[in-house]
Image (cartoon, rainbow, N blue to C red):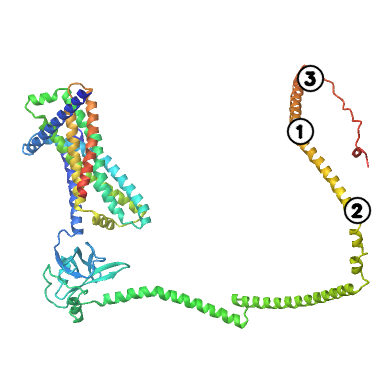
Amino acid sequence: MVARIGHWVNGKIRDSVYAAGYFYETIKALLLFFRRRQVGYKVLTMQMLFTGVEALGVISLLSLSLGAVIIIEGLILLPQFGQGDLIYTILITIITRELGPILTAFIIIARSGTAISTEIGNMVVSHEIEAYVSFGINPISYLVVPRFLGVTFSMVLLNLYFNIFGLIGSYLLGTLMQPIGFSEYLNGLLSVLTTADIISSLGKSAVFGMIISLVSTYYGFKVERATTEVPQKAIKAVGHSIVLCILANVVLTLFYYL
Amino acid sequence: MRFRIRYADQIVGVFVVLAIAFLLFILILMGSKQRWFTEDYFFSTTVRTAKGVASGMAITLSGIEIGKVEDVKLDENNNVKVDFLIFESYYDRVKKNSVMQLTASGIVGKALILHPGINNGDPIPPNTHIPSLDFAEGQKLAEKGLVTISQTHRSERILRILEAVEPVMENLQVSLVTVNEILVTLRDALEGDESRALGKLIKNIDDTVVTIDKSLSDTTGNANTLINNIDEVVKNLEELTADPEGLVPELLGNKGSIAKILDDDEVLFEEIHTILVELRKTAEQAREFSTYINSTQPQVSGILEEGRQTLDKTKDVLEGLRNNPLLRGGIPEEREQPSTFESYRDEDF
């Protein structure tokens, strides 16, 4: 029993040290990425295309419906307490600050996290990584850094689009229920929107993007030799990404109120 | 090659540029709304109380917001020091001899108003202390006419007082209307108009008084008749008792009927005693009989219950026999034998 616990703890420590080294190597390669005009740019562009542009449809639908639900509930409930103006605060709090980043992260985990983990895992199984190394190409620089940057940029940009569609969707549906001028609506939003809200939202999405890309590539490289390991590692990548994103969200929200 | 892959750079470029443009647009709008690109000028004033004063509260001039309260704190004399800023576009209104006024606004709120000084000079430098009307310094400036206390504020105060008086006047008017109605009702009642409530009340009282008077008259007549009758009865009774040969002396005398009944050597008493003894014996026998009946009641009940059960079983047996196909129709019909006994009630009357 004691031996088993010791083995488990040793394994966790070894994994943590390996993950920290992996993170360090990624950051080191990231700093060199923009100095070296290399083929990695094309990988970055493709990653942004797959992670950002192709997820736009799902994100816009989700944010439109979320904004619509908030405005419907808000316009019905809040005036009953004489707090109709609070609708703008609620919109900014939910769409911009809280649900926007985390829901975008979940969509990215489901779409791109699994894809990245599976792709890299299959490359390991088919010895492509060994081939890169034999040609003197650093797999971290060529495979991980573009994905890290691509997912992180895409997260931030998708979060912005989430806000655009969420706030516009709520306005469009709000005007159906209670006609209101666009300038009045925009003034209402701008009067409660602060730079802290924007920084919090963008900061969260950037952190979530880093977590998703690092965890997904890490578990992709954890595949050793069998193809059956690939889906197992992909599932682990999804689970750990979700847990880490939620924890990071809690920590960043606490920082916002400190 | 697919369109999306072929033009990946352009698509991603548009994707990035649109998002950044939106972010910049929002930031510019926020900046203009929250006055990021304008300069603010800071001043301070002192008021008696911080009640209703808070950070972010508007500084107004003729009802227009020209600044905001930044900080509220106590000074060394325990008065309230209010630090505030004036927007760049209204800085030129803050001239020498300007005063601040903390005034009531709305129901429970307060407003901090700037009253500009009367002169054509330059605005006072930032971070200057502007006196308030709560203290002698500001009041002196106002008394000397060095500051514009706009008629608007005075008339606003009067309007506010009038607004407060208005509901009182409305209540007074309602009260006057009510008093007038009462007076009209009273007048109508006094004039004999019975259609209103007071007239009806007075008429009812009048009717009641008449009825009481009539009842008293009738009662008095009846009482007189009764007293006369009693007098006659008393008179007859006196006559009856006064006669020495009358009925009463006869009854009460030594040879009267009552004396005869009582003086019979206890024959009557003995007869009554004998009857009572016989009655007692009969009651004793009746009690014993009822006790016996009570003791036999459970047995009688058991017998009745058994009889009832026997009848039920008999009924079942008969039902079985009736349903038996071998015996169906095999039992001759019994003829009912009429009873020879006839009670008196069976006879025809």
Query: Vertical placement of A55 versus B323: above or below?
Result: below
Q: Looking at the image, can residue B50 be seen?
A: yes
**Which quadrant is home to the C terminus of chain B?**
top right
Horizontal placement of B43 versus A246: left or right? left
Q: Secondary structure at mark 2?
A: helix
Q: Which residue position is annotated with label 2?
A: B267
Looking at the rendered structure, the number of numbered marks drawn on it comes to 3
Characterize the local packing of mark 1: few (<14), some (14-19) or many (20 or more) Cα atoms within 10 angstroms. few
Q: Residue at x 24, y 39 (%)?
A: A246
Q: Which mark is residue B296?
A: 1
Mark 3 chain: B
Query: Vertical placement of B112 versus B6: above or below?
Result: below
Q: Position of residue B24 (x, y in %)?
A: 17, 51
Task: Give the residue type that dot 2 points to.
Answer: Val
Which one is earlier in the sequence, the residue at label 3 or at label 2? 2
Q: Position of residue A250 (x, y in %)?
A: 23, 43
Mark 1 vs mark 2: in front: 2
Q: Which residue position is annotated with label 3?
A: B328
Horizontal placement of A191 versus B76: left or right? right
Task: Give the residue type that dot 1 points to.
Answer: Thr
Mark 3 vs mark 2: in front: 2
Find out whether the residues at labels 3 and 2 contact each other: C-beta distance under 8 Å.
no
